[in-house]
């Protein structure tokens, strides 16, 4: 139905959007909250799954209810 | 931009520690409290929060079992607290602001454009008489009255526009391009002009445009002779002169004449021999007070001084009474010397070339040059006899 009506998937399915710029910046939208935050790991709760960002010197540039921006050296983005 | 808004609204850097800082962040997000610069330091987190958001943190900290401490206060709302400790600094800012606003009420620079016949100096004098100079208050200037005054003062100004742009008074002029014709017309009204010979000689070429020619090619003329008459007789039917029509004679009359140039030079002279010893002093002149660095007494018996000055301008051409420069003092001794024949020749040649160049710039065509150099009683004399072609350009008013 989403396909046929050409509606945005993120708003209807609640899918998270993860935009990675190089290996130094990540922009995340549509998440529920932070589960864990350390300089090496950031674990975010999405609607149906968890997103794990691993790297070094990870900082949250800003954090709001809708989106967040993470900087640092990103090693991996995993869906759990 | 975001930083500027954050600074204006004020924000706090806080330290968060306790049971669940992650939940604290999630709840802040849910309550639309913006957090930024979040860093994990192991035992505690640091972050920035808006001032408004900080006031609603109490319930969140209670729920999450975290504790919050302010580490730094930033932004304009906290500036007054800091400023209280730096009274002179704040006073300085306010005074400079007041000075700036006060200076805005003056004209600091006058820009003039479109003037060709009226020179900048003449116009500046007019403005000075009209009591408009850099430093005049803006409110004392009536733009419309000024424009009217310019048009009344200078008849050849056909259009004028003045405007104040910041601290600059911009005056645009439009002059009458046909000014030459205008004066001609004026002259015609008064009775016209004859073209007369300004030197003795023979007419070698002649083209008349306006007026009655009185000479022809080959005619020998004396200084003051009428070459082209500025009054044209209008004859009646019986061949008698009915009346005269006056005009300004307009013709190209070339007269071949001879002219002489004499230059003298004494054989003996005192030659300056520079020892190569120099001293330099840097100068600053504020109004009439001159300061020179370094200060020293002149150890030379005979010396000459070369000064170079640079004027300091503000806003392009606003002159302030401050100059800086350099003074060079050079030692020399005088020695009695005699000119050699070659030196005399060289000096005379230089002088004569300069004279000839001046003549050529005036439109004089040199046909022949006869140079003689003689020495009599220790004085060298140069005599140059020139045969030149010169266009007559002297006018005589018809009485």
Image (cartoon, rainbow, N blue to C red):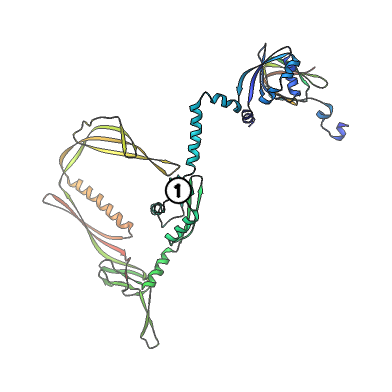
Q: Is residue B265 visible?
A: yes
Question: Residue B17: x, y in percent?
Answer: 69, 13
Of the pair B242 and B170, the residue shown nearer to us:
B170
Q: Quadrant of residue B224?
A: bottom left
- Going 43% across and 56% down the picture, which residue do you hit? B116
From what the image shows, is residue B190 above or below residue B44?
below
Question: Residue B166: x, y in percent?
Answer: 51, 45
- Going 25% across and 53% down the picture, which residue do you hit? B352
From what the image shows, is residue B359 above or below residue B218?
above
Q: Is residue B209 visible?
A: no
Q: Quadrant of residue B207?
A: bottom left
**Horizontal relation, residue B377 to residue B240: left or right:** left
- Going 78% across and 22% down the picture, which residue do you hit? A32
Of the pair B65 and B390, the residue shown nearer to us:
B65
From what the image shows, is residue B170 above or below residue B30?
below
- Going 31% across and 68% down the picture, which residue do you hit? B204
Which residue has dot 1 on it?
A: B110
Q: Quadrant of residue B43?
A: top right
Q: Chain of mark 1?
A: B
Question: Residue B1: x, y in percent?
Answer: 63, 32
Looking at the image, how many numbered discs can be counted on the residues? 1
Question: Residue B181: x, y in percent?
Answer: 42, 66
């Amino acid at each position: 139905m989403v396909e046929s009506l050409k509606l945005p998937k993120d708003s209807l399915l609640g899918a998270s959007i993860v935009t990675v710029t190089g290996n130094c910046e990540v922009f995340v939208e549509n998440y529920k909250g932070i589960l864990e935050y350390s300089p090496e790991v950031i674990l975010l709760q999405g609607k149906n799954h968890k997103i794990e960002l691993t790297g070094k010197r990870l900082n949250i540039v800003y954090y709001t209810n809708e989106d967040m921006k993470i900087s640092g050296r990103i090693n991996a983005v995993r869906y759990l | 931009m975001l930083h500027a808004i954050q600074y204006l609204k004020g924000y706090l850097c806080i330290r968060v520690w306790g049971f669940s800082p992650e939940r604290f962040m999630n709840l802040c997000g849910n309550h639309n409290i913006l957090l930024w610069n979040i860093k994990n330091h192991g035992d505690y987190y640091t972050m920035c929060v808006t001032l408004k958001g900080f006031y609603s943190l109490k319930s969140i900290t209670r729920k999450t079992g975290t504790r919050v401490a302010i580490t730094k206060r930033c932004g304009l709302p906290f500036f007054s607290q800091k400023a209280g400790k730096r009274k002179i600094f704040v006073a300085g800012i306010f005074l400079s602001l007041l000075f700036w606003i006060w200076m805005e009420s003056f004209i600091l620079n006058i820009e003039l454009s479109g003037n060709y016949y009226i020179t900048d100096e003449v116009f500046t004098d007019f403005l000075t008489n009209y009591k408009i100079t850099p430093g005049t208050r803006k409110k004392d200037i009536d733009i419309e009255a000024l424009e009217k005054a310019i048009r009344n003062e200078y008849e050849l100004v056909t259009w004028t526009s003045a405007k104040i742009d910041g601290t600059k008074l911009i005056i645009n002029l439009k002059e009458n391009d046909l000014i030459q014709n205008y004066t001609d017309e004026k002259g015609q009204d008064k009775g016209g002009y004859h073209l007369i010979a300004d030197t003795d000689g023979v007419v070698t070429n002649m083209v008349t445009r306006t007026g009655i020619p009185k000479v022809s090619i080959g005619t020998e003329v004396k200084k003051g002779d009428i070459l082209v008459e500025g009054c044209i007789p209008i004859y009646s039917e019986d061949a008698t002169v009915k009346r005269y029509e006056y005009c300004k004679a307009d013709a190209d009359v070339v007269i071949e004449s001879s002219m002489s140039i004499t230059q003298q030079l004494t054989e003996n002279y005192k030659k300056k021999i520079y020892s190569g010893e120099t001293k330099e002093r840097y100068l600053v002149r504020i109004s009439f007070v001159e300061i020179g660095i370094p200060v020293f007494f002149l150890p030379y018996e005979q010396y000459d001084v070369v000064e170079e000055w640079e004027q300091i301008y503000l806003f392009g051409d606003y002159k302030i009474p401050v100059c800086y420069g350099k003074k060079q003092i050079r030692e020399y001794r005088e020695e009695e010397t005699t000119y050699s024949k070659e030196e005399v020749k060289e000096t005379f040649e230089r002088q004569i070339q300069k004279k000839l160049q001046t003549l050529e710039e005036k439109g004089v065509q040199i046909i022949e040059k006869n140079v003689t150099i003689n020495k009599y009683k220790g004085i060298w004399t140069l005599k140059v006899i020139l045969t030149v072609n010169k266009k007559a350009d002297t006018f005589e008013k018809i009485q």
